[in-house]
């Protein structure tokens, strides 16, 4: 592992705002040419809500700042299937499948849902292999939600993700913008994590305009991977993501998030 090993925990005050997994494969034109009727029937009990097909821009690590442009990966044609709450979304594109949720509870649950979707994809479209595997965790820390309004960021986050906040020479009130972006190779072949972190608003409807700190990490590989071997990377990425987040936060913030140990 690239980041120090840490115990598996589940935070009672979970800062996760979304988890996304995207698996890309060579373009399959029939997905664009014909409606995925059989695919929908296979997933409809779990994802009954269908959203009309659209051509979408695929962005990587788009900033929560309204005026900050995303890094684009191109365009793809896609269909979206959602559960009745809208909290789980399965997206089928002509060259990718993706699963996302803001209600992430455990890796075991997310993994089970993802592999079920991949099984359906394989049954009806049989992609040759995956060209990119990405597992992305977006965390957003709001001090007011944790009773930490008067604590400076340098007491809550570790230096590698603090950027300018590491210094005591500048007051936080004088820093309305602060961003840090880096990529880091991981300790297994052809894999890396791309990280973007800094100040942002949790959502556009934030009436208080309180600024929080986001930590957005995309663990990925662009190595050609057999369909059956995708879980090797995904399990590694999940474990690395837990280590990475605990590497980012101080013991004080870690305890404020109220961690509970996960057996195993």
Image (cartoon, rainbow, N blue to C red):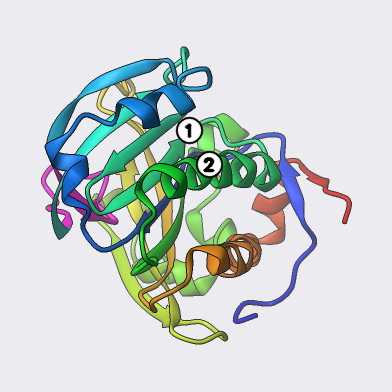
Q: Residue at x 50, y 87 (%)?
A: 189
Residue 121: where, in percent of width, then height? 42, 45
- Near-viewer residue (123 or 221): 123
Q: Residue at x 58, y 59 (%)?
A: 155
For this view, does 224 lie left or right of residue 72?
Answer: right
Q: Give above or below for 175 relative to 83.
A: below
* Label 2: few (<14), some (14–19) or many (≥20) C-alpha neighbours in 10 Å: many
* Label 1: few (<14), some (14–19) or many (≥20) C-alpha neighbours in 10 Å: some
Q: Residue at x 47, y 14 (%)?
A: 85
Instruction: Give the SS element for disc 2.
Output: strand
- Near-viewer residue (39 or 62): 39
- Near-viewer residue (83 or 87): 83
Q: Which residues are magenta?
A: 56-71
Residue marked by disc 1: 102
> Which quarter of the rendered picture does the C terminus lie within?
bottom right
For this view, does 229 lie left or right of residue 182?
Answer: right
Marks counted in the figure total 2
Q: Main secondary structure of the magenta part?
A: loop
Q: Give above or below for 88 relative to 22.
A: above
Residue 140: where, in percent of width, then height? 46, 43
Question: Dividing the picture into quarters, in which one does residue 249 lie?
Answer: bottom right
- Quick check: marks 2 and 1 in contact, CB under 8 Å? yes
Q: Residue farthest to the top?
A: 84
Whichever of callouts 2 and 1 sits on the residue coming sooner in the sequence is 2
Q: Is residue 64 magenta?
A: yes
Q: Nearer the viewer, mark 2 or mark 1?
A: 1
Q: Is residue 49 magenta?
A: no
**Numbered circle sitting on residue 16:** 2
Residue 254: where, in percent of width, then height? 69, 52
Instruction: Give the SS element for disc 1.
Output: loop
Residue 38: where, in percent of width, then height? 37, 28
């Amino acid at each position: 592992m690239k980041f120090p090993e840490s115990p598996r925990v589940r935070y009672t005050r979970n800062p996760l705002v979304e988890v996304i997994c995207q698996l890309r494969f060579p373009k399959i034109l029939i997905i664009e040419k014909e409606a995925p009727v059989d695919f929908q029937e296979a997933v409809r009990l779990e994802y009954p809500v269908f959203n009309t097909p659209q051509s979408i821009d695929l962005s990587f690590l788009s900033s929560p700042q309204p005026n900050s442009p995303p890094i684009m990966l191109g365009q793809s044609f896609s269909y979206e299937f959602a559960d009745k709450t809208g909290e789980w979304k399965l997206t089928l594109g002509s060259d990718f499948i993706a699963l996302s949720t803001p209600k992430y509870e455990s890796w075991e649950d997310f993994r089970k849902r993802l592999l079920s979707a991949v099984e359906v994809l394989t049954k009806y479209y049989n992609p040759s292999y995956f060209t990119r595997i990405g597992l992305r965790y977006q965390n957003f820390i709001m001090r007011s939600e944790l009773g930490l309004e008067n604590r400076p960021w340098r007491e809550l986050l570790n230096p590698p993700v603090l950027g300018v906040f590491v210094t005591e020479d500048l007051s936080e009130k004088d820093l309305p913008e602060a961003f840090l972006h880096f990529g880091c190779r991981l300790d297994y072949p052809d894999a890396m994590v791309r990280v973007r972190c800094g100040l942002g608003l949790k959502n556009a409807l934030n009436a208080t305009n309180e600024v929080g700190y986001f930590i957005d990490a995309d663990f990925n590989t662009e190595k050609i991977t057999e369909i059956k071997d995708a879980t090797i990377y995904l399990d590694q990425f999940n474990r690395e993501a837990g280590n990475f987040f605990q590497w980012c936060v101080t013991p004080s913030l870690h305890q404020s998030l109220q961690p509970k140990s996960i057996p195993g």
